[in-house]
Amino acid sequence: LKSENRLGSYGLRALVAGVLLTISQPLIYLFIRASEKSSQEILALLSRQKTLEVLGLTLLLLVIVVCVNVFLGTAIAAGLHYVKIPYPRLLLVSTVLPLAIPSYVFTYTWKAIFPALEGIWAAAFILSLSTMPYMILAVSISFQRIDSGIIEVARTLGLSKISVFNRVILPQVRRSISAGALLSGLYVLSDFGAVSLLNVETLTVSIQNLFKSSYDRGAASVIGILLFFAAAIFVLFESILKGRDFESRGAEGFQEQIRRIKNSALSALTILVIALYGFLAVVIPFYVLISRYLQNPGIVAFSDLFSAAISTVSVAGLGAFIAFILSLPLALLATQGPSAFAAISGKVILISHALPGVVVGLALVSFGSRLGPLYQSAFLLAFAYAVLFLAKSVASTTAALTSVSPHLKEVAATLGKSKSGIAMQVVFPIALPNLALGVLLVFLTAMKELPATLMLRPTGMDTLATEIWSYAAISRFNEAAPYALLLVIIAAIPTFILTIPRTAKNEIEQKVRYL
Amino acid sequence: LKKSWIAAGVAFAALILGGVSWVVSGPDNSGGQVKELTIYSGRSEEFIAPFFANWEQESGIKLNVRYGDSAELAAQILEEGSNSPADLFLSQDAGSLGAVSIAGLFTKLPTGTGAQIEDIYIAGDRSWIGVTGRARVFAYNPQAVTLLPQSVSDLTKPAYKARVGIAPSNASFQAFVTALITEKGATFAENWLKAMKDNGAQIYLKNSAIVEAIDKGEIDLGLVNHYYTWEVSQALGRDIKVENGFFAPGDIGNLVNVSGVGIMATSEKQQAALDLINYLTSEVAQAKFVKDTHEYSLIPGSKAPASLPELKSIGSPKVDLASLEKVQATQDLLTKVGLL
């Protein structure tokens, strides 16, 4: 039995290595292109003042956005969870809804009201608004998982509410805060839409400019590799900061209705902050899009909207499905306990998440154009989405599978279940809702993707994102508005599903059924 | 519960596969007769699609059009190399055509192609041919500007302090600076850019933003392509307080750039592709460009777009358009001066 397990484990590792190789294509492409340059040229490019300035600006933006997220995002999530407020569900939805708005649409709508908006502070503002939901969502989910029994114990031991939060709750959600910071930081590194519209030259904009202006793919690739290393350092830094794993008691802990703090001043403050965030990040974009649309309703044919929506949903859906399949071996590996191989695999995937769409697009153009009919097919575009957003899928898939308590697996083992039996009958059923969330997250992000879509879509196929782009390119914002509105509304559906609470009660029921 | 999840997954997959196959109808190239042609178009769908539709009707050949940004499509073609599915590349500017041409990916066009087009708007090696003319102008508010500049050098004088808008990150401005470097040398170009910056030139992202800013009264003049006053007025659905002005004949500020087209060397449908080029450069299509997109026809002696002088009378500088591909030096200069 033991040798069989070992064999299975080697097979799994081979699968994981295959997935890593597949998604490393953009990186391989960057190294091939960069190697066309001589080492002097590379050194000159890396050490010129412009490159250093761009790198500095990118890192500054990253730090600002991550800090805002860590403090404000955690505070909002805590308010949503522990302060007595009316309609907590509705407020949660309104703080997560900005996920449905692509960063370029976000920026367009803000610039429609404040045309002078530009520069690093504007970019920090817009990117903080659009990445906050990642933090709120990550932290909220882990608040839901905290064993309220511990909180009760701490309270009976005489700790004040604030000490309970600082000493009992925060340490348990530290990993989630860290994960939220990671997601928003990688988002900042790879974002092109917001920064380019706000005239801020980050590494991504530099790469795009070099590709566009000089057709110098070697130079662009050198900067691409620089971006890769910046992301690598950020990911390693995060894994050091988040510290030791807090042992997950997860769902087996005792969860009763959370006792919310009843304090009118605190409630008012919480509502005010959330309302302000909702106003800036949801009301303003929607207001601009709707008013633009109403200025000239019916300007866009319904059939065009419909076919663009169908294309968007089906290709993004296929991409999410492929990402899910690719994430399974990695998640399974993670359930077999910590190992160096699993840790490194996870890091590689996270780091490649920072590569911008234009790099992944061009890499797949380079490899894909040799594939005959597969090139510029919906499948290759979907595959590009999977490569771009695999990290999102892996993160939630792994979280889903590792959230299953080891004790539970031990119990199953003593009941005579085999390793694969445990995986199929215990781990998967419990993790399934979270696995679905990973698919949703990729689906949601893929619908908003633009640069790779432009390069890889089947010739003649329009998605909502490409239609927005084509009208915005000639300043026809009224025509772009219905497409943007439809995209945001469709993306709001998976966003809404993301906020549905998954209660421990559900999970316990499932466990009982499958044991 | 497990079964219901699997069922949901299967339904989801079926829905997606169905959607994908509904979206993608496979290309059909059976038989010797050319039925389809693939064109990468850097010109926006809104303005060029009617021309394509006309040709499809005339020729009976279906066009698969891939829309994108000219420079990005050029980069994509360079990456695809000999595997490119494109038969033609239609670009907004000469620079992107130049990049593809230097890589040797265009075929040499036979001498009869686009015979009416003036020679200076065709690449020296006949790798591409101009389709429409796009003049650089100064857009201005006639009520605010009484003393019109005669040369781009005038714009650095105190009379225009903080009144001029430019778009240094935009491809059309960079093409102009490239021409400036080619014609007058890098030192001259650097001094001019510095002087513009010191004279308080306002920075915008796009030509259209400059025209809008003049209309709003934020600035009084701006360096743009000629058709943006028309385009912005169309987009806003009203008249605007902006007119086009030309510098003295021969000034580099009157550069005429072109949108143009070339045929990929790898295309197996050369004849059909040539036919499309002949249509785009025909009298009928050229007149339609003038009327519908407010660009210049490149046929000598043809009518100018409404309220604009004839192409000949602009006195555009003699610049080799193929040289506009060298944008890297321009970007480095703009960066050095601090405008990028």
Image (cartoon, coloured by chain):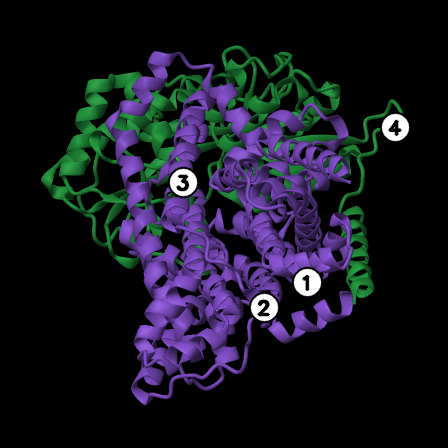
Chain colours: A purple, B green
Q: Residue beneath label 2, please?
A: A251
Q: CA distance from mark 3 to mark 1?
A: 30 Å
- Looking at the rendered structure, the secondary structure element under dot 3 is helix
Could you tell me which residue is drawn at 50 percent across and 72 percent down? A147
Q: Residue beneath label 3, please?
A: A236
User: Where is residue B228 drawn, in percent x and y?
Assistant: 41, 45
**Chain to which mark 3 belongs:** A
Q: CA distance from mark 2 to mark 3?
A: 29 Å
User: Where is residue A193 drawn, in percent x and y?
Assistant: 44, 48
Same chain? Circles 4 and 1:
no
Given contact means CB atoms under 8 Å apart, are the residues at marks 4 and 1 in contact? no
- Looking at the rendered structure, the secondary structure element under dot 2 is helix
The answer to whether any part of residue A301 appears in the image is no
Could you tell me which residue is drawn at 49 percent across and 51 percent down? A472
User: Where is residue A467 drawn, in percent x and y?
Assistant: 58, 51
> Marks 2 and 3: which is nearer the front?
2
Q: Amino acid at mark 1?
A: Ile
Given contact means CB atoms under 8 Å apart, are the residues at marks 2 and 1 in contact? yes
Q: Residue beneath label 1, please?
A: A430
**Chain to which mark 1 belongs:** A
Comes first in the chain, label 3 or label 1: 3
Q: Amino acid at mark 4?
A: Ser
Q: Residue beneath label 4, please?
A: B30
- Looking at the rendered structure, the secondary structure element under dot 1 is helix
Q: Amino acid at mark 2?
A: Ala
The relative height of residue B251 versus residue B104 in the rendered view (above or below) is below
Q: CA distance from mark 3 to mark 4?
A: 54 Å
> Between B170 and A230, which is closer to the camera in this rendering?
A230
